[in-house]
Image (cartoon, grey):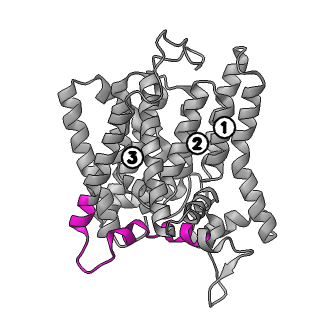
Amino acid sequence: MIDSVDQTGAPAAPATSRPTLLDGAAIALLLYATTRVVQLVFITWLAPGGGPSIKDRLLAWDGGWFIRVATEGYPHTYTYDDKGVMVGNGLAFFPLYPGLIHAVHWLGTSYDYSAIGISWAAAGVASVLLYRFGAVLHSPRLGYALVVLFCAQPMSVVLSMAYSEALFSALVLGALYAAYRERFLVAGVLGLAAGLCRPTGLAVGLAVVVAAVVALRAGRGGWRAVTGAVLAVVGVPAYLVWVGLRVGDLRAWFTIQTAGWGTTFDWGSSTWTFLETAFHQGNSWVQMSVAFILVAAVVAVVLAVVRRTWLPLTVYGLLSFASVVGQAGYYHSKPRLLIPVLLTLLPAGYAAARARPVVATLALTGYAAFGLWYGAYMITVWQFTI
């Protein structure tokens, strides 16, 4: 599947003319910007009159939590409602994104626009890195196809919102691309940052560890590979321990997640129950659409794994996908959580890269139209959290 790796998963010898990071960046950014503009048009079209502004919709749900952490900091203990029942609080949200919001605000921008601006900038960086990664894995056509698939997938609207998916995706892609090029110190630092951004940053760290092990077994990398691997995996446990010490309970982060959002890892039991219910007695088109998105994602992951995908990317993709389907929680949040998985994009990306240009363009355009409309619908018409 990937022409640039050998049987062990190590990068192949570079070509004489090595591409640079900025090759194709302008087109990748143009594709990204086009998807953002089209989605804003859909949001404007679908938003009911007299309702929240477009900016307020982009700041909804988790955006409010991130901005609250950026403005007020973290609480010191559990939080309870008026009836004494434990509820979620800001400690559930990892610190990098709200920390950046606070830093950008300190430069003179409002918290609201700082949060949105970071997401827009990070998603642009992620698009360039995704193009570059696709180009070295196979071809520039794969890179462009992956950019469209990433920027227009269902719930890609969060790339424009005050959510951490855009920043996390940029860090994931940066870490994986650096590991692919065996720049392990860079990969380690970016993996550390990913671990301070979202809990699935641990999957990124483990992918960097795999890449480092492959390099070390081939006699490459040395101390840089070891150092990068260690750095990449410490972010998530460091934050979880910090929360535990702050609250006085080492399981505090998990307790807060469960109390506030019903998030527990149940090995996919809740997801399976949801799919059974949706396909047997589903009465909502959103419920059915989420079910089909999950099934399509499972198929895509299987196709990516059974073919020759670069091993560290496979490790990251499988672990991050398992975190989506393996945990209980709001079913309508799962398409959003799939955004940074990346592995789900590869089969369609390769198909588009190998198809005739006209066929690929039409297919990607149709996919983008649906995906961008879907995300707009979910923050304008759909009334529940995403």
Q: Amino acid at mark 2?
A: Leu
Residue with the most extreme front position: 108
Across and down, in percent, residue 289 comes to: 32, 56
* In the image, residue 18 lies in the stretch drawn in magenta: no
Q: Amino acid at mark 3?
A: Val
Boundaries of the magenta span: 41-69
Across and down, in percent, residue 372 comes to: 29, 53
Q: Nearer the viewer, mark 2 or mark 3?
A: 2
Q: Amino acid at mark 1?
A: Leu
Asked whether the beta carbons under mark 2 and mark 1 sit within 8 Å of each other, the answer is: yes
Tell which circle, 2 or 3, labels the residue nearer the N-terminal end. 3
* Local secondary structure at mark 3: helix
Q: Which residue: 34% across, 50% down? A: 292
Left/right of residue 299 with respect to residue 177 in the rendered view: left
> Which of the image's four quarters has the C terminus?
bottom left
* Local secondary structure at mark 2: helix
Left/right of residue 371 with respect to residue 329 in the rendered view: left
